[in-house]
């Protein structure tokens, strides 16, 4: 069958012929997104390692089972320790398998997996919103952040502030529900900008996909008792957090890691998120890319494309 193939760590995949998958539950792949974790695994930098070379990348996929069900597949070493989903067929093995709601476009359903749930689960499960919060979204210009802006609004936030570098994407965040925006690199005083854009008293909830300097500033700006959920490090792997701010404000800091989410949480929240998208309450820009163009798509993902790239066999 045709599939993307990683032949050497640090290199983009090419399209090749590989053996048909075997084992438990083979699916016909309908759509397979590209995610930053796929590039990390293929670079050899991912903490859990990589599958034996050569291998088929892709840590998630939407596909059709032999009995005709359309499902989302993720976890259980899929694309991390064994072949993944960027091919015409894939073996489910021990992965989480969740049925996709009827009438969902497979490419959109695939894009709402790792990326969509990263923007949804912090608010809906990891540190649930109770209503009335002022939410600061750090990294609001990527696919995850744009979902987060919408999820925060949908789940009860009173005010949402979008933070990112790309001015055009910040405008999109505003169109999708952000009450205010802060452009990184344009504000002279991030602490003041975060506090002012949050209504003067600072955010009560910080969704952080950046870490680094933006998170350090957000901690200084945060209101007493604020919640911080970190799920990424796009601005750097370390951050200097002022102990006085963390202790003095009684901040609640949580980590969120997709591969640590229980299967039952995915079973509950993935269909819920897709149904919100079907109802027009969550929007995600998805670009369908033919499997033949996997090498170019991989390079575009590495350069930080705005749209969610989803490979379609």
Image (spheres, helix red, strand yellow):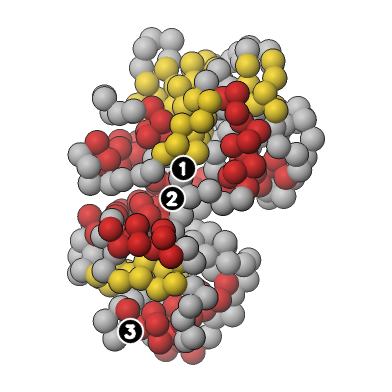
Q: Position of residue 93 (x, y in %)?
A: 55, 23
Q: Considering only order in the chain, which callout, 2 or 1, is on the residue closer to the N terminus?
A: 2
Q: Residues within 10 Å of mark 2 (few under 14, many from 20)?
A: many
Q: Quadrant of residue 13?
A: top right
Observer able to see residue 257: yes
User: Is residue 279 toward the left or the right of residue 61 in the image?
Assistant: left
What's the residue at 41%, 60% (across, down)? Answer: 168
87 over 81 or under it: above or below = above
- The numbered mark at residue 196 is 3
Q: Are marks 1 and 2 in contact (CB under 8 Å)?
A: yes
Q: Quadrant of residue 66?
A: top left
Residue located beneath label 2 in the image = 143
Seen from the viewer's position, the closer of residues 272 and 162 is: 162
Which residue is the extreme one toward the front?
168
Q: CA distance from mark 3 to mark 2?
A: 25 Å
Q: Quadrant of residue 195?
A: bottom left
Seen from the viewer's position, the closer of residues 46 and 5 is: 5
What's the residue at 59%, 43% (across, down)? Answer: 300
> SS of the residue at dot 1?
strand
What's the residue at 60%, 23% (across, down)? Answer: 292
Residue located beneath label 1 in the image = 308
157 over 249 or under it: above or below = above
What's the residue at 61%, 50% (across, down)? Answer: 303
Q: Considering only order in the chain, which callout, 3 or 1, is on the residue closer to the N terminus?
A: 3
Q: Considering only order in the chain, which callout, 2 or 3, is on the residue closer to the N terminus?
A: 2
Seen from the viewer's position, the closer of residues 18 and 241 is: 18
User: Is residue 218 toward the left or the right of residue 235 in the image?
Assistant: left
């Amino acid at each position: 069958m045709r599939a993307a193939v990683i032949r050497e760590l640090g290199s983009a995949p090419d399209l090749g012929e590989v053996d048909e998958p075997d084992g438990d539950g083979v699916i016909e792949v309908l759509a397979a997104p590209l995610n930053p974790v796929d590039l990390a695994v293929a670079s050899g930098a991912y903490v859990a390692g990589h599958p034996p070379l050569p291998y088929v990348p892709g840590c998630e996929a939407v596909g059709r089972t032999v009995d005709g069900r359309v499902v989302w597949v993720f976890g259980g070493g899929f694309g991390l320790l064994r072949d993944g989903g960027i091919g015409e067929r894939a073996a489910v093995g021990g992965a989480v398998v969740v049925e996709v709601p009827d009438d969902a476009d497979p490419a959109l359903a695939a894009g709402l997996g790792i990326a969509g749930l990263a923007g949804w689960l912090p608010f809906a499960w990891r540190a649930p919103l109770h209503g009335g919060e002022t939410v600061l979204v750090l990294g609001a210009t990527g696919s995850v952040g744009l979902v987060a802006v919408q999820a925060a609004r949908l789940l009860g936030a009173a005010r949402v502030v979008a933070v990112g570098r790309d001015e055009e994407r910040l405008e999109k965040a505003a169109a999708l529900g952000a009450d205010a925006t802060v452009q990184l690199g344009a504000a002279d005083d991030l602490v003041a900008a975060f506090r002012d854009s949050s209504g003067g008293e600072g955010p009560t909830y910080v969704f952080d996909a950046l870490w680094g300097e933006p998170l350090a500033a957000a901690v200084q700006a945060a209101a007493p008792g604020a919640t911080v959920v970190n799920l990424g490090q796009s601005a750097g792997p370390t951050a200097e957090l002022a102990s006085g701010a963390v202790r003095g404000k009684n901040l609640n800091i949580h980590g969120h890691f997709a591969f640590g989410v229980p299967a039952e949480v995915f079973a509950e929240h993935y269909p819920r998120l897709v149904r919100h998208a079907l109802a027009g309450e969550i929007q995600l820009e998805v670009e369908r890319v033919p499997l033949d163009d996997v090498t170019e798509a991989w390079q575009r993902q590495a350069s930080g494309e705005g749209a969610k790239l989803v490979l379609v066999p």
